[in-house]
Amino acid sequence: MSGRDSGVNAPPKLVFLGPPGAGKGTQGALLAERCGIPKYATGDILREAVQLDSPLGRESKGYMQRGELVPDEVIIGLARNALASPSAKAGFILDGFPRTIGQAEALQAILAESGRTLDAVLYFAVLREELIRRLAGRRVCGDCGAVFNIHSDPPAIETVCDRCNGQLGIREDDEEETVLNRLDVYDENTQPLLAWYRTSSVPVHEIDAGGTVEDVYERLLKAVGCS
Ligand code: AMP
């Protein structure tokens, strides 16, 4: 069933669900731009807080370094703030939130307070071996945050950002041991969310997220559009 058939109107209110490395951030940025809606990534918000050494950052840093989930009450507060923004009133993409059933229940309640409901959950499915390869190849610009991949989207010079000439590095939690832990944490905590959403009234679209960015984006647009 396509998104248009399932009644997703412009602009959509979406949750992107899937393991680390599935491409949620990349695809979310493309769709958010096309639809003119904000994308909120709890991981990005937390990384910025860590960089600023704010109380939120200091509270979250250890969990993130170990590849564990930051406690629900912290994350739910973040999401509540983001969703209260006027720009999120009509539509939004949530990337990396919710990650537990507790967070999903809280999201439902937060949206209900303002008479909103989700239009769809997009589940990005990728094989574990591919995720490990992608995460090991990911390079992030320390200055502008641009994301490259040495396998699929390499920068012209291996350690230099094509966009701003900043220094490219490996995200601390993309180191191999942490990656394996993040994938286990995903299987244990976030995978059950998929079953939870499938029993809810929100349509769930499974996207084959293997292959190139362009291929996946094409599949995403077939599932959900905004015009
Ligand atoms: P991400 O960039 O989405 O892979 O998130 C990086 C890290 O931030 C995760 O490994 C968690 O430690 C933390 N994090 C991000 N989003 C959440 C969330 N919804 N619930 C709990 N922890 C989160």
Image (spheres, rainbow, N blue to C red):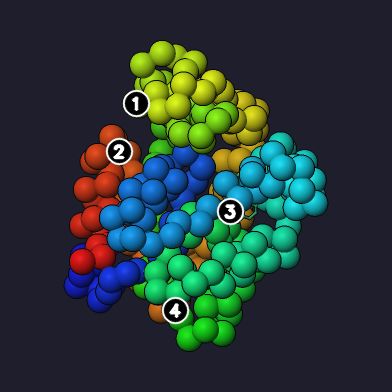
Q: Is residue 141 left or right of residue 75?
A: left
Q: Secondary structure at mark 3?
A: helix
Q: Earlier in the sequence, mark 2 or mark 3?
A: 3
Label 4: which residue?
Answer: 117
- Residue that appears at 39% across and 43% down: 26
Q: Earlier in the sequence, mark 2 or mark 4?
A: 4
Rendered image quadrant of residue 105: bottom right
Q: Earlier in the sequence, mark 3 or mark 4?
A: 3
Q: Secondary structure at mark 4?
A: loop
Amino acid at pointer 2: Val
Residue 78 location (% of width, % of height):
64, 62
Residue 211 location (% of width, % of height):
29, 35
In this orientation, which residue lies closer to the viewer: 152 or 36? 36
Mark pair 2, 4: CA separation: 28 Å
* Circle on res. 213: 2
Disc 3 Cβ-to-ligand 1 distance below 8 Å: yes
Label 1: which residue?
Answer: 152
Are dots 4 and 1 in contact, CB under 8 Å?
Answer: no
Q: Secondary structure at mark 1?
A: loop
Q: Callout 1: 10 Å neighbours few (<14), some, many (20+)?
A: few
Mark pair 2, 1: CA separation: 9 Å
* Circle on res. 42: 3
Amino acid at pointer 1: Ser
